[in-house]
Image (tube, rainbow, N blue to C red):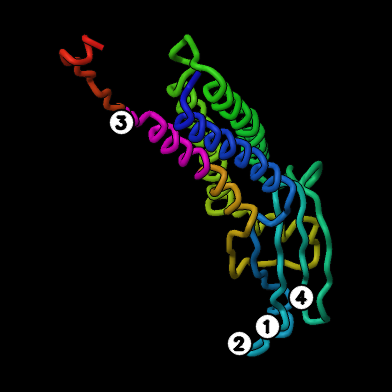
Amino acid sequence: MPGWFKKTWYGLASVLSFSSFILIIIALAVPHWLSGKILCQTGVDLVNATDLELVKFIGDIYYGLFRGCKVRQCGLGGRQSQFTIFPHLVRELNAGLHVTILLLLFLALALALVSMGFAILNMVQVPYRAVNGPGGICLWNVLAGGVVALAIASFMAAVRFHDLTERIANFQEKLFQFVVVEEQYEESFWICVASASAHAANLVVVAISQIPLPEIKTKIEEATVTAEDILY
C-alpha cells in the first residue's frame, strides 16, 4: 500500500483528471466559444452610411461547436436568429476540420477518465507493472492534454485561416452581406484551455508524489547494567 503522502497526491491527480472531464463536457454544451461584431455591408452601401452611422449596422454573433445566435442590424432594428451547426451549416464550413475538433474533444473525454482511473489505481495499491505506475499516469495525462491542445489549435485555425465567423454570419443570407469587424474568444474556449492546463498540472502533482520523505528515526536508549543490578 502506498503511504499517506503519495495517496494524497494521487487523490489530487484523480480530482484534476475528473475536473478536466467535466470542463470538456461544459465546453461542448455551452455555445460560447467565440463572439464577435458583424457589419451589414449591404446596408452600409445602400445608404452610403457615414462613420457615425455605422453603429446602426453593427450586429452581434456568438456560437459554439453545435449552435449559436446572430443579431442582424441592417438599419431597421435588430433581428435575432438562432442557428445550429448540424446538419446544414456544417456544409458551408470546413466540415472535416470541424468534425475533427469534435472527435478530438470526445477522445479527450475518454483519456481524462483513463488518467483518473490510473491515479485511483496508484492511490489504492502499488501496481506490479511500471506502466501502470506514475509513468502511466503521466503518459495518459500527456495524451489527454495534448489532444485538448490540438482541438484548441484546430479551432483557432478554423477562425483565423478559414473565416469561420464570416461563413456562419452569411449562412442562408441572400440579400445581405456581413463582414466581421471584431472577434474574441469566450468562456467555452477558455474552459477548454483550463482542461488542458489541468492535465499539465497533473504532471507536476505526480512529480511531487515521487519526492522521498525523510525517515523519522526514534532514538533507542541503551540499557546499562551495573554490578548492583546483578546482585538484586
User: Disc 3 marks which residue?
Assistant: 214
Q: Answer whether residue 207 is magenta in the image.
A: yes
Instruction: Report the Cα–Cα distance between label 3 and label 2.
Output: 71 Å
Q: Position of residue 45 (x, y in %)?
A: 69, 79
Magenta range: 197-215
Q: Which amino acid, by three-letter code, is at mark 2? A: Asp
Q: With respect to residue 155, does 3 lie above or below?
A: above
N-terminal label among 2 and 4:
2
The residue closer to the viewer here, 184 or 177, is: 184
Q: With respect to residue 4, does 98 lie above or below?
A: below
Mark 2 nearby-residue class (10 Å; few <14, some 14–19, many ≥20): few
Q: Identify the residue at image location x=32%, y=29%.
A: 216
Q: Position of residue 217 (x, y in %)?
A: 30, 27
Q: Which amino acid, by three-letter code, is at mark 4? A: Gln
Q: Outermost residue, front direction?
A: 232
Q: Secondary structure at mark 1?
A: helix
Q: Position of residue 29 (x, y in %)?
A: 74, 47
Mark 4 nearby-residue class (10 Å; few <14, some 14–19, many ≥20): many
- Depth-wise, is mark 3 or mark 1 nearer the camera? 3
User: Disc 1 marks which residue?
Assistant: 55
The answer to the question of whether label 4 and label 3 lie on touching residues, with beta carbons closer than 8 A, is no
User: Disc 2 marks which residue?
Assistant: 51
Q: Which amino acid, by three-letter code, is at mark 3? A: Pro
The answer to the question of whether label 4 and label 1 lie on touching residues, with beta carbons closer than 8 A, is no
User: Disc 4 marks which residue?
Assistant: 73
Q: Secondary structure at mark 3?
A: loop
N-terminal label among 3 and 1:
1
- Depth-wise, is mark 3 or mark 2 nearer the camera? 3
When asked about the image quadrant of residue 112, the answer is top right
- Depth-wise, is mark 1 or mark 2 nearer the camera? 1
Q: With respect to residue 104, does 75 lie above or below?
A: below
